[in-house]
Image (cartoon, rainbow, N blue to C red):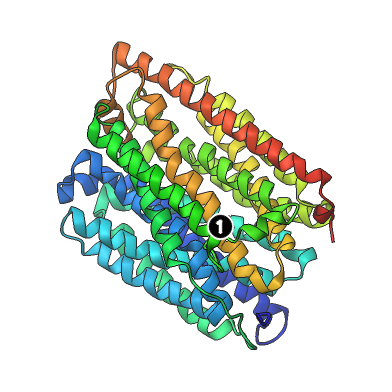
Amino acid sequence: MNQPAAPLRPSTGTSHTGLAMVVVMTGVLITAVDTTIVVLALPEIERGLRIALSSVIWVVIGYLLVITLLSTQVGRLGDMFGRVRMYEAGFAIFILGSLACALAWNEAAIIGFRVLQGIGGAFVTANSGAVIADLYPPERRGRAYGYNAVGWSLGAILGIVVGGIMVTYISWRWIFWINVPIGAGALLLAVRVLHEKGDRARRRLDPAGMITLGLGLFGVLWAMTKLATSSFDSTIIGYLAGGVVALIAFVLIERRHPSPMLDLSLLAIPTMTPSLLASLLQGLANFATLFLVIMYLQGPRELSPIHASLLLVPGYMVGSAVGPFGGRLADRHGAVLPATIGLGVQVIALFVYAHLALHSGLWMVVVASVINGTGASGFFPANSAAVMKASPPQVFGIASGMLRTFANVGMVFSFAVAILIASRSISKHLAFAIFVGTRSLHGHLAVAFTTGLHSAFYASMVFMVVAALLSATRARKTADKPA
C-alpha cells in the first residue's frame, strides 16, 4: 500500500519558508526566461548555426515537448524518492543543459541540448507545484501560487530585456551562459533551505505510455510545422497518420496500465477535469499570442525583435503585481471566481489584438498586453490552487505533473495552430520567416498578413471562451469550496 509522502519541512520558522519560496520562484523564473529569451534569439541561432528555416522552431518546440512528456513521470519520481531531491536534480540537469547549449556547434547539437535542458526544466516545473503544496496549508496555497506567477512574469521580462540586449550587442550564446550562475546559486540555496523526511510512496513508471504519447505528439507536431512551410503531401500525411495511431495506442495503454502516465482516476475528482482542460485550452490560446504579436510587429510594422518584444514588457510587469492578489482571492473565495474572470479578461485582450491594423497606434499593443497579463495572473494561481487542493496529498507530484502536461500540450500546439491560420493570406514560407525575424512586409502583403493574424486571434478567442466556460462549471462542484 502507498505510504503518504511526508510534508516538506523548512528548517526553522517563517523566514525559512520564505527562502524556500524564493528557491521555487527562481526555478520558475529561469524556465520562463528560456521560453521568451530563445524566441528573440531564433534569427541569430538560425544564421550562426546555419539551421534550416523549417527546423529552427524545434529549438523552442523541442524544449516544451520534452517537458510535456516527462512532467507526470518526474512528478511521480518526486512522490517516490522525494520532491526536493527531484527538484534539486532538475536544477543540476538544467545548468548542464544550458552550458551545453552555449557550446552548441550545429543544428543537431542545439536541438539535442535543448532537449537536455527541457529534461531539467521538467524536473523543476513538475515538482515545484508539489513543493508549494507541501510548504503551505490549503488555505494559503493560492497566495503562494500567486508568488509563483510573479516568478514567471519576472522571468519573461528578463528573457525579453536581458535576452534582447545579449542577442543584439553580445552573442546569442550568452542567453544560455546566464543560466549557469543563476541556476548554481539557486541550487546551493535549495540544498541549504529545503528539507524533507519520511516514507515515500511506492509507484511504478509508465515508459510505454510516455513513448507512445511522445511519438504521437511528435508526429502530429512535425506534420503541422511542415505544413506551415510546405504543401500538403504524402510525407505530411504519413507523419500525421502515424501520430494519430500512436495517440490511440497511448489511450489504450493508459486504460490498462496499473500506474498510468496520466492517472485517469484523478479525473473522477469533481474539480479536476475542468481545471486541467481549462489549463490546456488557455495554453493553446494564450501561448500563441506571443508569436502572433511579434509576427505583427516584426512583419507589417517592421520593428526589430528587441523593440517588438519590449512593447510586451508592461503586460508582464502588471501580471507580476496582480499574481499574489489573484492568489489571495482564490484562498478567500475559491478558485472559480478569479480563474474564470481571469480567462474572461484574456478574451478581451485577444479582442483588442484582433483589431490591430496596419497603422494602429502601438499603444494598443501595450494596452492589450497589460489586459492579458492581468487576466493570466488571475487564472494561473487560482487554477493551480484548485488542482492541488482537490488532489490527495500522497499524489501531489502526479497531480502537479498532470497540470503541467495539460498546459504544455496546449502550448506546444499553439504555435502550429496559429501559424497555419495566420498564413492563409500569404506564402506559408514567408509567414514562417516573419515569425523567426528574418523578413518584414510591405504594401499589400502587409495588409493581407494582418488580416490573417486577425483570424488567428479570433480562433484564440474561441479557445479562451471554452476554457472560461469549463472553469465556470466548477461553481457547481462542492469540492471547490474555500477552506
Q: Residues within 10 Å of mark 1 (few under 14, many from 20)?
A: few
Query: Can you say which quadrant of the picture contains the C terminus?
Result: bottom right
Which residue matches tag 1? 255
Residue at horizontal 63%, vertical 87%? 199
Q: Position of residue 273 (x, y in %)?
A: 67, 49
Front one among 388 and 102: 388
Is 91 situated above or below 405? below
Residue at horizontal 45%, vertical 39%? 414
Instruction: Please identify the quarter of the rendering in which residue 306 is found.
Output: top left
Is 275 situated above or below 135? above
Instruction: Identify residue type, mark 1.
Output: Arg
Residue at horizontal 51%, vertical 84%? 191
221 vs 106, left or right, is right
45 vs 66, left or right, is left
Front one among 404 and 478: 478
Q: Residue furthest top?
A: 444
94 vs 21, left or right, is left
Residue at horizontal 44%, vertical 58%? 69
